[in-house]
Image (spheres, helix red, strand yellow):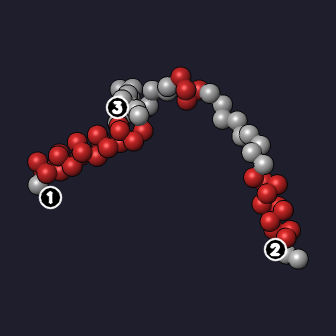
Amino acid sequence: MSESKQNERTRELGELFVSVTGDDTVTEPQEPEGEKVADEADDEEYVVSDDGLDGAIDADLDTASK
């Protein structure tokens, strides 16, 4: 693939990424040493909520084993 076609494809994929994710950029800022700069949202702890799926799966497995 020629460099101009590759650059065009990269731009198209970048625009697609931005439109799908809602982010305003494709890349994250980095420190000079190459380390990513943490967003404030990255500092939040991920909490798993009980959505009832485990109980539904267990009930389905119990029914299937009978």
Q: Amino acid at mark 3?
A: Thr
Q: Earlier in the sequence, mark 1 or mark 3?
A: 1
Residue under the image location 23 percent in, 42 percent down: 11
Q: Name the residue tied to disc 3.
A: 25
Residue under the image location 78 percent in, 48 percent down: 52
Q: Amino acid at mark 2?
A: Ala
Dividing the picture into quadrants, the one containing residue 50 is: top right
> Dot 3 lies on which element?
loop
Q: Estimate the x, y position of residue 3 in percent, counting from the top left.
A: 12, 50
Describe residue 7's horizontal placement relative to residue 65 as left or right: left
Dividing the picture into quadrants, the one containing residue 64 is: bottom right
Q: CA distance from mark 3 to mark 2?
A: 47 Å
> Dot 1 lies on which element?
loop
Depicted 25 relative to depicted 9: above or below = above
Q: Earlier in the sequence, mark 3 or mark 2?
A: 3
Q: Estimate the x, y position of residue 24 in percent, counting from the top left.
A: 36, 29
Numbered label attached to residue 1: 1
- CB contact under 8 Å: marks 1 and 3: no
Q: Name the residue tied to disc 2.
A: 64
Residue under the image location 78 percent in, 54 percent down: 54
Which image quarter is the C terminus in? Answer: bottom right
Q: Residues within 10 Å of mark 2 (few under 14, many from 20)?
A: few
Describe residue 42's horizontal placement relative to residue 21 as left or right: right
